[in-house]
Amino acid sequence: MSSNLLHSFAKPSSDAFINMVRGDMALLWDDKGNEYIDAIGSLWYCQIGHGRKEMADAIAAQVSTLETYSTFDPFTNPLAEAVATKVSSLSPIANSRVFLCGSGSESIDTAMKIARTSQIQAGHPERTVIITRNRGYHGTNYGGTSAQGLPLNKIGYGTLLEGVIQVDADDIEAMSIAFEQNKGKVAAIIAEPLQGAGGVWPSSTEYLTGLRRLCNDNGAYLIFDEVITGFGRLGEWFGATYYGVTPDMITFAKGVTSGYQPLGGVITGEAINTALATDPTFFLRHGYTYSGHATVCAAALANIAIMEREGLVERAKHIGARIEKGLQALSADGTLTGYRGAGAIWAGKLPDDMDATIVRDAMIKKGVIARSIPGVIAVCPPLVITDQQIDTVLDVFASVVQSL
Ligand SMILES: Cc1ncc(COP(=O)(O)O)c(C=O)c1O
């Protein structure tokens, strides 16, 4: 063991890591000078590309003015206010408000707590059950660990949260039965509009509309986890717009800053806002030291400004169409056994028994970084990736699969 760093999602006994030292748009370099195309946006988050000086300038300007100050009562700061206003204006939820935190996991725990406390404030303390879906990934705090539908990630951490249950994804009948079995007790559903880390599974509009209807009929809140799908990934600012279904809350993180600073948040709609603000004596006892961190918010504003100026949300459609065409051709010629995705997030299905990690590692050796998930290789590139770089990603993917 040569490193003091205990890595995330890694074997603690391992010391074989690729040491990334520099980035420029969709390109990366390690400490040995090897060049890579980043086809996964680091971890599904880097919309504007790496190493952008404009981001450094925005962050430096804020640090030298006021790095941050607490936003707990009675304080606020103009950057946190501006991010809330901007995110609210981009969101498909009318008259929304925005809670800020530091990560996707914190956004999920926040949404779960807000759902339960809003039900109490709305006069329904009996509505406490939160329904999530198999294959869903909602982060690794205790709330998110309880909510996620990837069984391996739940093992070894003791008793998880009570009243958080999973049903089969994309099966409206299963969701309907869960509502019947918990009649009058459901506080909320949490669903990714497109399941990302669980293997890139797009939903159908019909299914998401069905979730909306079940929530309306049963007084439950619909929460979309848009930590990956938010901020342009599907060719709209939010996946909710892509699918034309409006939830009561949206969790976000990742693309809101493209990873230049850690930011997460929850967009809340009128049902929640009314429940929370009707009683003037109610005090929301939830928040993080770095909620509304001014420098983090400066990065978000600069990132969103770049995305708007460069038309990156629209560009996601072009990128996605090119990747889809490539995967379609590789499926047609028998290299792959299929593909799935939406917007600028796609997965190519590997031949049976082919180990995705072996494919990923062979691709890295050829200078392309994609993500291995059992059975598939996923891509979710920076929205500034060039057409030529996309073609290289597809060529390397094809040659590796054909060689194994
Ligand atoms: C849909 C979704 N929700 C929540 C999270 C957790 O976010 P974080 O790793 O920033 O805590 C992730 C991370 O990949 C995610 O994909």
Image: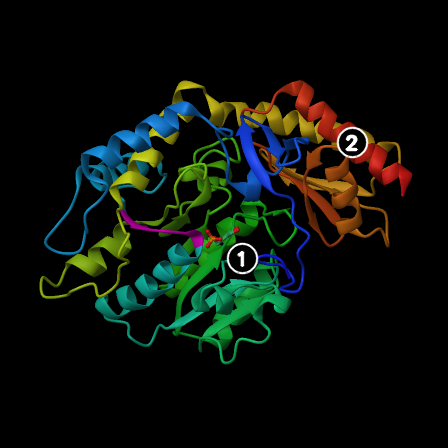
- Spatial distance from mark 1 to mark 2, Cα to Cα? 31 Å
Q: Is residue 78 above or below residue 392?
A: below
Q: Is residue 54 above or below residue 288?
A: above
In depth, the one of 317 and 11 nearer the eye is 11
Which residue is denoted by mark 1 in the rendering?
5
Decide which of tag 1 and tag 2 comes sooner along the chain. 1
In depth, the one of 394 and 191 nearer the eye is 394
| Residue 101 counted in the magenta span | yes
Query: Residue type at mark 2?
Result: Val
Badge 1 element: loop
Which residue is denoted by mark 2 in the rendering?
396
Label 1, ligand 1: CB separation under 8 Å: no
The picture places residue 275, in percent across and down from the top left corner, at 22, 60
Query: Residue type at mark 1?
Result: Leu
Q: Residue at x 57, y 59 (%)?
A: 172
In depth, the one of 376 and 280 nearer the eye is 376
* Left/right of residue 117 with respect to residue 390 in the rendered view: left
Label 2, ligand 1: CB separation under 8 Å: no
* Left/right of residue 302 with respect to residue 31 in the rendered view: left
Image quadrant where one finds the C terminus: top right
- Residue range corresponding to the magenta coloring: 98-104
Q: Residue at x 33, y 65 (%)?
A: 113
The picture places residue 212, in percent across and down from the top left corner, at 44, 53
Q: Residue at x 59, y 23 (%)?
A: 318
The picture places residue 284, in percent across and down from the top left corner, at 20, 63
